[in-house]
Image: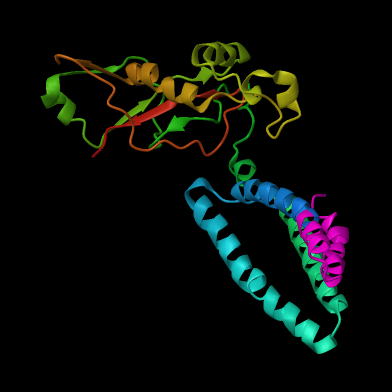
């Protein structure tokens, strides 16, 4: 919709430029630029959602650079050629309108494509009868059943013997709206997609989603279900090397933790 005004304002700009009046020409350029700026602001968000996170900046950069080179860079040359060939501003206007129509068509095609988050999203909730929700917080998959008793190691020598071992996976933690609201209260993150159930129902995921950091924080107690370390002076959470949230965790889903010791 932001491009539609350009179908009128772009020709008007060239007509005002053709009057050779400096003031009118400036008005024409200023007015025609307004929908152009609005369109570019929305385009950045649309392009960002069409690429996975690890390719996002590269994809957006290629889109801008290729379009700027192939179309933006050649437009002044083609416009001057048309003006010299026909001696009329009408041909230049027609070329500008053609570009607007082409851009509008590309935008409509882009809107029909699902964004990358929606393509990557898992099913909403696991079957209730199986009691095995589909969402799992995991770095390395494990086929073992949930551990009923944690493995206990004593001191660094025993810790080192775990290198490369699968340590099983924890029990499942259901994501309730009450749990999400409690985390929002503690963290101060009350963004509507987490806490406003009515608005989220009409949003991109059909319901509220949990905070990514809340899911990550549950890795600590789930770690404790799988491994207990004894015989050390202290055990501190040093941090994580890589964390990504490629798909949302919706309310009423659940998640677990699979643990593997690095080799």
- Residue range (magenta): 1-30
- Which residue ends up furthest to the bottom in the rendered image? 85
| Residue drawn at x 80%, y 60% as measured from the top left | 23
Q: Is residue 147 visible?
A: no
Q: Is residue 83 visible?
A: yes
| Residue drawn at x 33%, y 14% as measured from the top left | 149
Q: Is residue 207 magenta?
A: no
263 or 182: which is nearer to us? 182
Question: Percent x, y for residue 77?
Answer: 68, 80
What colouring does the structure picture have? rainbow
24 or 246: which is nearer to us? 24
Quarter occupied by residue 160: top left
| Residue drawn at x 63%, y 66% as measured from the top left | 67
Q: Is residue 50 above or below residue 214?
A: below
45 or 227: which is nearer to us? 45
- The chief SS type of the magenta part is helix
- Which residue ends up furthest to the left in the rendered image? 157
Q: Is residue 68 above or below residue 80?
A: above
Question: Percent x, y for residue 224?
Answer: 33, 16
Number of disc labels: 0
Quarter occupied by residue 189: top right
16 or 250: which is nearer to us? 16
Q: Is residue 22 magenta?
A: yes
Question: Percent x, y for residue 132?
Answer: 54, 25
Q: Is residue 185 left or right of residue 207?
A: left
Q: Is residue 70 left or right of residue 109?
A: left
Quarter occupied by residue 168: top left
Question: Percent x, y for residue 169?
Answer: 39, 26
Q: Quadrant of the C terminus?
A: top left
């Amino acid at each position: 919709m932001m491009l539609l005004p350009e179908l009128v304002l772009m020709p008007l700009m060239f007509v005002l430029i053709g009057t050779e009046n400096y003031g009118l020409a400036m008005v024409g350029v200023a007015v025609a630029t307004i929908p152009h700026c609005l369109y570019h602001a929305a385009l950045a968000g649309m392009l960002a959602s069409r690429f996975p996170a690890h390719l996002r900046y590269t994809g957006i950069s290629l889109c801008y650079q290729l379009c700027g080179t192939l179309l933006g860079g050649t437009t002044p040359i083609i416009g001057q050629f048309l003006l010299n060939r026909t001696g009329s501003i009408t041909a230049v206007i027609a070329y500008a309108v053609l570009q607007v129509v082409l851009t509008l068509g590309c935008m409509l095609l882009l809107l029909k494509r699902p964004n990358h988050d929606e393509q990557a999203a898992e099913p909403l909730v696991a079957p209730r009868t199986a009691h095995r929700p589909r969402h799992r917080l995991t770095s390395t998959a494990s086929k073992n059943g949930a551990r009923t008793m944690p493995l206990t190691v004593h001191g660094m020598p025993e810790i080192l013997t775990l290198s490369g071992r699968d340590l099983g996976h924890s029990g499942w933690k259901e994501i309730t709206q009450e749990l999400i609201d409690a985390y929002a209260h503690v963290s101060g993150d009350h963004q509507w997609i987490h806490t406003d159930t009515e608005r989220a129902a009409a949003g991109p995921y059909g319901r509220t989603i949990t905070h990514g950091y809340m899911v990550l924080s549950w890795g600590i107690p789930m770690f404790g279900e799988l491994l207990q370390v004894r015989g050390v002076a202290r055990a501190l959470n040093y941090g994580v090397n890589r964390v990504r949230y490629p798909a949302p965790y919706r309310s009423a889903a659940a998640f677990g933790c699979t643990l593997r010791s690095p080799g």
